[in-house]
Amino acid sequence: VRRAVLLLLGATVASVAPPAGAAGASAPFEAWPYLPVAERLMQQATNQTLGFRRLEYLCDTFGPRLSGTTNLEAALDWIIAELKRDGFDRVRTEPVLVPHWVRGEESLHLLEPHPRPLHALALGGSVATPAEGITAEVLVVKSFADLAAQAAEARGKIVLYDFPYTGYGSGLPYRSRGASEAAKVGAVASLIRSLTPFSMQTPHTGMMRYEAGVPRIPHAAVSVEDTLFIQRCHDRGQRVVVRLRLGAQTLPDAPSRNVIAEVTGREKPEQFVVLGGHTDSWDVGTGAIDDASGCLATWEAARLLRQLEPRPRRTVRLVLWVNEENGLRGARAYRTNHNDELPRHSLALEADLGVFRPEGFSFNGSAPARQMMQAITRLLERLGASRLEPGEGGADTSPLAQAGVPVSELLTQRERYFWFHHTVADTIDKLQPDEFNQCVAALAVVAYAVAELPELLPR
Ligand SMILES: [Zn+2]
């Protein structure tokens, strides 16, 4: 009954008095005492324009930010200067050596049944073709099992994986291991259908790997339309011949940085709530959705917490990781550098699914901690962002999860996320300032409540 009354109050009144009397040891955790500040944070977040203007400026000024590029380093310099201007505590960087892969010039041309250019992007980490390209017949396969069944046909051909897309994960094995599996049966190059549910001839890049001891063949993603075209020809028994040219290069590792800024806790400064996104992006588009938006939304949430009076009980630490896309070196460096502090990390929260309309959070932690997180996300009912679902958390927090830190990720209305993911169309015009602000509000409230809890989230 008390909860029902408070729910009603919470829906209509901006300032609700915390329920009187401390809960008994066996009573479930309630987050309603945090509602007045949560309401204030949500109000402040929705009245801001600075965060979205900074997001636009970052994407338009520095462009794509692949690890190893001067674009990325210039963007990091600007971010650091702005964080200092905001008045965060201990704004600093930690060095990270990152892979340096360069795309170069590339093309995929159809030669038979008729000549025309096709739409393709090399996958990150791919080797180049010879300068004249690789010209070969295409063998279409639906799966690795299908490749094994047609292994005798693959020698000397370019294998195209046209797997049924049933979600991002369904195509990942072909993107990451497709080249090595095709090379094992004698293919000279490999292609994948782009990992997306929707396409307007936009190929999607992403990370791939080579298996040790297997010949390294070029590997690229083809647009869904061109994949289906080749599939139809193949099904009719028509010969499809293409010429693939990739100019990719892997240069020596390059120096880069994680960026860290803090809001020092008023009572437990040695305990942390971490939130952040990743500063690097792929080299196509401007990485607005993935993940400049996550960086700016968490940054803006932390900035609102910095302005709170009094400040949260424990330290809120903004971590902007580098090299999520093709190495995860920033995430690993953070874990190594802060290993001693990890038992004092209450939560690590990432935003890396775009700043579309927020729906809630994923959470990976103990059952008692989950109950507390569920109570906290209920503060976001007004935003429609109170869902809490089990999940792995973001890629950058995965090394922390392995070390036992509870992790969470902002969930958004993300069906559009994979339309633009890793394409030339990942640009700022796909995002809306009001949705961005709602994400800021959700992030600020969760980070605030966890930083304000009497104790660390139980492990
Ligand atoms: Zn990302």
Image (tube, grey):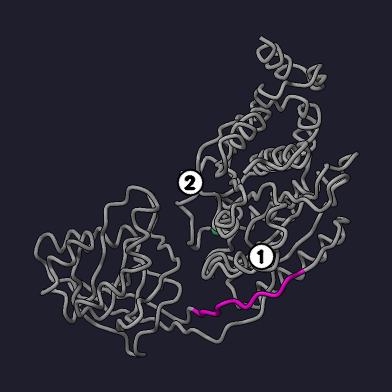
Secondary structure mostly seen in the magenta stretch: strand
Q: Position of residue 276 (x, y in %)?
A: 67, 54
Q: Report whether 274 appears left or right of 208.
A: right
Q: Earlier in the sequence, mark 2 or mark 1?
A: 1
Which labelled disc corresponds to residue 416?
2
Q: Residue at x 19, y 61 (%)?
A: 145
**Could you say which quadrant of the image residue 313 lies in?**
top right
Using the rendered image of the protein, determine whether residue 411 is visible from the camera's viewpoint.
no
Q: Position of residue 214 (x, y in %)?
A: 30, 81
* Mark toward the viewer: 2 or 1: 1
Give, as a three-letter code, the residue at label 1: Tyr
**Could you say which quadrant of the image residue 228 lies in?**
bottom left
Counting every numbered tag in the picture gives: 2
Determine whether 7 is above or below 279 in the image.
above
* Ligand 1 occupies quarter: bottom right
Residue, disc 1? 334
Asked whether 120 or 348 is in front, the reply is 348
Asked whether 134 or 163 is in front, the reply is 163
Quarter of the image containing the C terminus? top right
Q: Is residue 100 rendered magenta in the image?
A: yes
Secondary element at tag 1:
helix
Q: Residue at x 49, y 84 (%)?
A: 250
Secondary element at tag 2:
loop
Determine whether 363 is above or below 377 in the image.
below
Q: Residue at x 80, y 50 (%)?
A: 315
Q: Give the residues in magenta.
A: 93-102
Q: Position of residue 391 (x, y in %)?
A: 50, 44
